[in-house]
């Protein structure tokens, strides 16, 4: 199902130079003849509505409830963690994966994924083909101005369309501020989660990092 | 009127607390003076700090004193405006020492679905204030109480949520 990108040096260069913080966008991520099989895996995975002060969406449980999604997640980690570790310089191994459905009125407000005590190192979102492609639902990245260790200003810096069969990978840090803009129509479906650091970060030099 | 003790011991809603024409007059006075807060990891809104509205504050103060049985005095006032796409997250809300009373009156021109205020105790929502014009909410703010103003959907293109918020403390 999953295939690792082969142009690691080019991707590492893009990762390192991306603004406002390191990220990659990889289109046509899954072979076209695999997409139906991928969607079939998700058909049996139930989603529930989640709501908090920063989010409203539907998602599968934190842990897959079907063997098929478990295998899909484990395969994602096995194939991609070594490659992404080389590209980003972050020694990641484990990954989690949930299915998300954003309908009209659903959103995820600006936040960074960094949490003390968790070893989230890289965040990812893979956008699935939708029977009703979404209007809105872009991934928006923000540039943060920091003074004395605190964010003092936030500015929109990059808008990433949730295009089908696109993978977005981005850095997790205190300033990796991002949001999923409100979906205004259609259905935005994705697989998303984090790669977790296996060792203290900063021990590897990113491949081709400028 | 129901007393606070009969509910959560801390929160109460009073519908129809202000005449719509009076609410419109307050909006007209202060809306031109709004300034925008843009640290988007915390909130997105417009506000006026310390708007001088003695008659409105007196109305809110009387309601709070009746509900709590406490003698109160106004410490701060604020006018808050949320447009489509705006929100105030819980971690933008200050924690207050003591046991002040927060009173909010809804001055919005029309109700806005889902644009609620959520009061939280230890992170869990215990009291929801819908966006309904002229509705008054009285909440005793203990040190563990925070609140957030929910995201206003862009699907409600003409939504305009206007709230006048005062903080009251026991008077000497």
Image: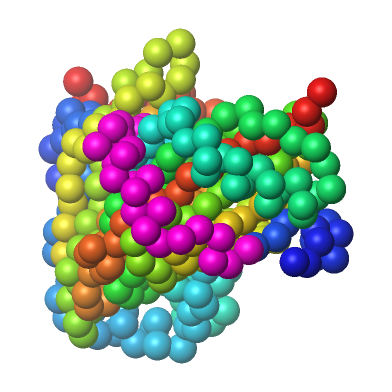
Residue B71 in sight here: yes
Q: Using the image as rendered, state which of residue A96 and residue A105 is in the foreground.
A: A105
Residue B38 in sight here: no
Left or right of residue B124: residue B49: left
State the scheme by which the image is colored.
rainbow
- The mark tally for this picture is 0
Q: Residue at x 41, y 53 (%)?
A: B22
Q: Residue at x 48, y 45 (%)?
A: B164
Instruction: Classify B45 as above or below A79.
Output: above
Q: Using the image as rendered, state which of residue A10 and residue B127 is in the foreground.
A: B127
The segment highlighted magenta reads B14-39
| Spot occupied by residue B116 in the image (x, y as percentages of width and height) | 50, 61
Q: Residue at x 44, y 73 (%)?
A: A58
Residue B26, magenta (yes or no):
yes
Q: Using the image as rendered, state which of residue B45 and residue A78 is in the foreground.
A: B45
Q: Residue at x 57, y 79 (%)?
A: A65
Residue B60, magenta (yes or no):
no
Left or right of residue A39: residue A97: right
Q: For residue B75, what is the image quadrant?
A: top right
Q: For residue B71, what is the image quadrant?
A: top right
Q: Using the image as rendered, state which of residue B33 and residue A51 is in the foreground.
A: B33
Task: Quarter of the image for the N terminus of chain B: give it.
Answer: bottom right
Task: Quarter of the image for the C terminus of chain B: give it.
Answer: top right
Instruction: Single out the residue that lies furthest toward the top.
Output: A148
Instruction: Classify B111 as above or below A204.
Output: below
| Spot occupied by residue A76 in the image (x, y as percentages of width and height) | 39, 62
| Spot occupied by residue A124 in the image (x, y as percentages of width and height) | 35, 53
| Spot occupied by residue A142 in the image (x, y as percentages of width and height) | 27, 36
């Amino acid at each position: 199902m999953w295939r690792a990108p082969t142009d690691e040096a080019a991707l590492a260069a893009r990762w390192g130079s991306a603004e406002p913080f390191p990220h990659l966008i990889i289109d046509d991520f899954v072979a076209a003849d695999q997409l139906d099989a991928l969607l079939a895996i998700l058909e049996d995975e139930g989603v529930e509505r989640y709501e908090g002060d920063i989010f409203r969406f539907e998602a599968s449980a934190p842990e897959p409830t079907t063997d098929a999604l478990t295998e899909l997640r484990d395969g994602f980690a096995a194939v991609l963690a070594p490659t992404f570790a080389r590209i980003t310089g972050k020694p990641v191994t484990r990954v989690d994966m949930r299915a998300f459905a954003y309908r009209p009125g659903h959103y995820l407000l600006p936040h960074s994924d960094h949490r003390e005590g968790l070893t989230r190192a890289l965040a990812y979102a893979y956008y699935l083909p939708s029977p009703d492609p979404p209007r809105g639902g872009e991934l928006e990245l923000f540039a943060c101005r920091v003074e004395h260790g605190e964010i003092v200003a936030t500015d929109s810096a990059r808008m990433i369309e949730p295009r089908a069969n696109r993978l977005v990978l981005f850095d997790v840090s205190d300033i990796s501020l991002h949001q999923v803009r409100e979906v205004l129509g259609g259905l935005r479906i994705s697989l998303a989660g984090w790669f977790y650091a296996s060792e203290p970060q900063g021990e590897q030099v990113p491949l081709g990092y400028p | 009127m129901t007393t606070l003790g009969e509910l959560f011991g801390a929160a109460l809603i009073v519908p129809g607390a202000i005449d719509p024409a009076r609410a419109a007059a307050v909006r007209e006075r202060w809306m031109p003076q709004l300034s925008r807060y843009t640290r988007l990891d915390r909130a997105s809104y417009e506000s006026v700090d310390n708007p001088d509205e003695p008659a409105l504050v007196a109305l809110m103060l009387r309601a709070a004193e009746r509900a709590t049985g406490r003698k109160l005095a106004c410490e701060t006032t604020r006018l808050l405006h949320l447009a489509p796409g705006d929100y105030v997250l819980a971690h933008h809300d200050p924690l207050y020492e003591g046991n002040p009373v927060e009173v909010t009156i809804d001055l919005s021109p029309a109700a806005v679905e889902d644009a609620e205020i959520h009061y939280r105790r230890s992170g869990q929502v215990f009291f929801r204030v819908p966006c309904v014009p002229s509705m008054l909410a009285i909440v005793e703010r203990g040190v563990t109480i925070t609140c957030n103003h929910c995201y206003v959907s862009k699907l409600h293109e003409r939504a305009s949520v206007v709230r006048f918020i005062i903080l009251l403390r026991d008077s000497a």
